[in-house]
Structure formats: structure tokens, C-alpha cells
Amino acid sequence: MTTRHWHASYGEIPKEINADAYRSVTEMMEQAMKRFADKPAFRCAGQTLTYAQVDGLSRDFAAYLQARLGVRRGDRIAVMSPNLLAFPIAFLGIIRAGAVQVNVNPLYTARELEHQLNDAGAETIIVYSGVSGTVAEVMDRTRLKTVITTGVGDGSGVQIPSPPVDARLGSATSLAQALEEGSKLPFEPVELNGDDLLFLQYTGGTTGLSKGASLSHRNLVANTEQFKACMPDNVRAGEEVVVTAIPLYHIFALMVNFITYFSVGADNWLVPNPRDFESFIDTMKKARPTVFMGVNTLYAGLCAHPKSKEVDWSNLRLAGGGGAAVIGAVSDKWRALTGTFIREGYGLSETSPVLTFNPASIQEFTGTTGLPMPSTDIQLLDEDGREVGIGEAGEICAKGPQVMSGYWQKPETQAATFTADGYFRTGDVGVFDAKGFLRIVDRKKDMIIVSGFNVYPNEIEAVATGCPGVIECACIGVPDEKSGEAVKLFIVKAADATLSEADVVAFCRNQLTAYKVPRIVRFVDALPKSAVGKILRRELRSVT
């Protein structure tokens, strides 16, 4: 855009940030651990770790990785865990050893996990004992050499009952053992810079296989600095209290709840299972958060639960929403409950993730995703690659220091992923208003968003086609009051097939994470197709 017209709405927000404010995320986190040494850093399952304790434990884990496993700068290490104390210890240990964290959804099926581990080339995985069976199932078909298991109390020094480790992983080491051993081993600090890889953040692929967004230390330092610049009154050093219910393996929680708020000395309460609303709300009552981040479904669930009225919300200054559209009615209910509206933002795994956010100057729900972040340029392009005018819809294309360099080991996708002048094509369609606020109006891709998680039709179709009796299929997203969208699958079955809707769902459930499993299955005689045989998913929206 020749003029960044949103700058006129910035007020006191700086137009640019320093993406090299720290040489690496590691340096930023190490400074925080020294500065806030005596303050509580993380709480979970009744246990608390101070910043000094996290410093020591992550140092010990880094030493173990280096001295026992031979981990070196740039090696990829997978982490497959819910929000437990083990997660921040593992992450900080991994990056202090100079390695790259591969974030894995603990609910993944064996098929999904196998692809991700092989694509990343991971030889080590840290896995929660409760899902260790999935790792055991794929171990022989990957490059994995080392499995480190975690339990609920690992890192706290307290034994807390946890699910057993799968018996097939007899040679696995517990995180507690690794920390104990690492405490006796030397640690060699690793010199990192902004170009070093920090995360491989996997996101859906058009072929049905997920791709790893290569996120560097500079990408995350930049996005942290951008967020702080937009929300200066909500990043008060040593004063913030955050409840983290959205999963840390998701880039939204990882960047905002963990990295940003850790860097300013926040007290972070981890919620391993937000579906357990009783326990979740008990945590809210104890924490009395100043900051809360969630997706629309989480906010809706909290608003509907009678115990939420028992929480003292008087400290809450920032409620942020992302991952999927925040519904105005949900924000209204949240404001009635807490006195604070939901401030919506927009981003993707490929952009670390935040591209736009409703700034501190906004005092009510806008129905938009806010203004582009400092140092961020956004163009809305039509089908011919021309920039559209204010009020007109175009594909959101972004450039900024938070945007990934590309997908892991996928150089052939660069031309389709970026414009000729280096703007990342999001696949989402947006409209700018005269003040520079961005509204998302459509998705160019056929992506479905279920409870804030991206679901790609190609992956669902690739799995469902393998079900005996299915000739071909296509899926779309349909509105769902609870999850925002649900997966609806249309199937053409073989003439002699006795296939039922329940059979299809059961088959898919065996190979897909729960949120990807079709909620609705419809059998049809034929699928709508173009002249060249391409299935026209959009036409399926009118099929009941």
C-alpha cells in the first residue's frame, strides 16, 4: 500500500518496532529469568515454579540434551504435551541448547504424528505419558532415537499421579530423570541470532499433509515487541497475572501467553484441560487474572457456566480473542460477566502469529480484527494481483518481521506462498475501513475453523476416501453454534456398499484428531464438478 492509512489511527503506538531488540528469544527469556528471579513464573496442579527455578531446571535440561543426547544448534526436538509445568521447562531447555522446537498436538493420531516427525526430522520427543501410546505406535517408522516422558508433577519435585507410560517405550527416560542427571552435567551456552530457527509450527497443507512454518528467533522477538507496542498498559513488568487455557502447542498461546508475558515477568497459571470447566474456573478464582486469551468457544463456555459468576474479575484489563472469529453476542455476554469486552486480533501460524489487533485506544467490541501491527504492511489484492480500494474485498497479503521465511524444506511452494514482491498470501479475504481496521469477510482457501483450529478439507477427504465403500467425497464447513464451524462430509458410495454414516465417522476417528472428524455425513448420488472434473465445494453449501 502506498500509504499505510491505518497509521492515522495509531495514536501513541509507534509505527515501527525493533525486530532485533534481542539477539534471540533465548536471550530475552534468560534476561527475564534473572530480572524476575524471585517471582512466580508458572503454576499448575497446585505447584509453583519461580523464575529462578525455571532458570535452573531449563539449564539442567539443556545440559542433558547437549551432554547425553548430543543435541546441537538447529536440531529439531518435538514436544507433545498439554499445558503442564514440563512444557516451559522443555521449551526453555531446548532453545538454550540451540535446538528447534517442533510443536505437536497431543491429541494427534498415529498417522498425523508420523508425518510430522518424519517431515521435521526429529530424533527426540518429549511426550506426556497420557499420550505416549501414539509415539510407541509410530516409533519404528520415524527417526526417533530418544523418548522423554513427562507427568503432571514433573519439574515441581512433587510426585503427582499421572497416566502410565506405554509399556512399549521401555527405554524411555522421564523428564524428572533427565533433570536430575542434567543438574550434574556441564552446560555450554549457544550463541544464537535472529536468523536461527526457533519453531517448526505445523499447519494444514493443500495436499492433505501439514507443512512446517519455519519461524525464526527474530520472527518471535518481533511479534512480542509488536504486541507490547500495541498493549503497553497490559504488559506491566512483574505485575501481570495470566491464565493459560488455550494450548501452548498452538502459536497464539505460545507467543502471547508464554513468550510475551514471560518476558515481562508475569505469573502464569497453566490449565491442562480447559474442558474440565469446574477445575478451570477454580483456577480462575484463585488467579484473578489481569490478562486472559481465548477462542470464541472458550469464552462462550465460560459465559454459560454458572460458576463463572463466582470469579472476581475486577483485575481483568485485557481479554484477547483469536484463532477464529469472535462473535459480537459472545463479547457482549463476556462484558456483562467481567466488565471487559473481547479484543479481537488476526494472524496465522506463518506470521508468528499476530498481524492485526484492536489497539488499547479501542473501548468496545468492533467486529473487526483491528489495525495492522507496527512494522507490518498489509495489501488486499484482487484476483489479478492488483490492490483494491478501501471498502473493497481482497486477499490479505502481509509483509513484516513476524512473517516466516517459508515452509520447512518446501522451496517449491515459495512462488505460490508469496507474491513477487515478498508479501505472504494468507488465503483469507478482508476489507479495510477508512480508519485502517481490517474485517475478515471470507476465506479464499476452503479451510474450516473448528473451535479455533484449522481443518483442511483435502486432509479429511484423503482419509475418508480410504474407507471401504467410498468412491469419492468432499467436505465443507457449516455453521455450528458450539464450535463456530463443523465438518460436513458428502460421500458417493459404491453401489453394493452397506456403509453407514456411523461407519464413516468411526473410520475417520481412527486417523484424525477429534476436531477434524466429520460431525455430519451425507450420502449423495454425485458431487458437483467443473468441466475439468474439479469438485466444486462451494456448490455443496446449498445441498441439505
Image (cartoon, rainbow, N blue to C red):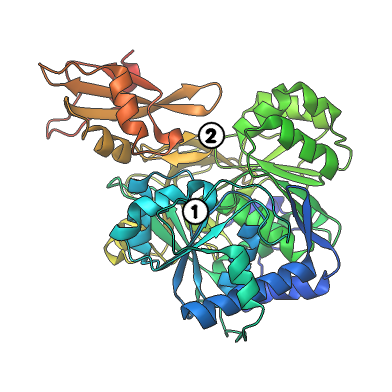
Give the position of the C terminus as an image quadrant: top left
Going from the N terminus, do you reach mark 1 or mark 2 first?
Answer: 1
> Please, is residue 525 above or below residue 258 in the view?
above
Q: Which x, y percent locates residue 354?
A: 58, 53
Residue furthest toward the top? 544
Question: In the image, what residue occupies the spot 60% across and 31% down?
Answer: 297
The kind of residue tagged 1 is Ser
Q: Which x, y percent locates residue 130?
A: 53, 46
- Could you tell whether 433 is left or right of 520 in the image? right
Q: In which quadrant of the rendered view does residue 466 lie?
A: top left
What secondary structure is found at the residue carrying circle 2?
A: loop
Q: Which x, y percent locates residue 238?
A: 85, 62
From the viewer's side, name the closer residue of 197 and 440. Answer: 197
Instruction: Report the Cα–Cα distance between label 1 and label 2.
Output: 16 Å
Question: In the image, what residue occupies the spot 43% across and 48% down?
Answer: 133
What secondary structure is found at the residue carrying circle 1?
A: helix
- Could you tell whether 321 is left or right of 65 in the image? right
- Could you tell whether 121 is left or right of 239 in the image? left
Give the number of the disc on residue 451.
Answer: 2
The kind of residue tagged 2 is Ser
Q: In which quadrant of the rendered view does residue 76 lie?
A: bottom left
From the viewer's side, name the closer residue of 101 and 164. Answer: 164
Q: Specify few, some or many for label 1: CA neighbours under 10 Å numbering under 14, 14-19, or 20 or more.
A: many
Q: In which quadrant of the rendered view does residue 123 lie?
A: bottom left
Question: In the image, what residue occupies the spot 34% across and 35% down?
Answer: 510
Q: Is residue 520 visible?
A: yes
From the viewer's side, name the closer residue of 139 and 95. Answer: 139
Q: Which x, y percent locates residue 108?
A: 43, 45
Q: Is residue 419 visible?
A: no
CB-based contact (under 8 Å), mark 1 and mark 2: no
Reading the image, the residue beneath label 1 is 349
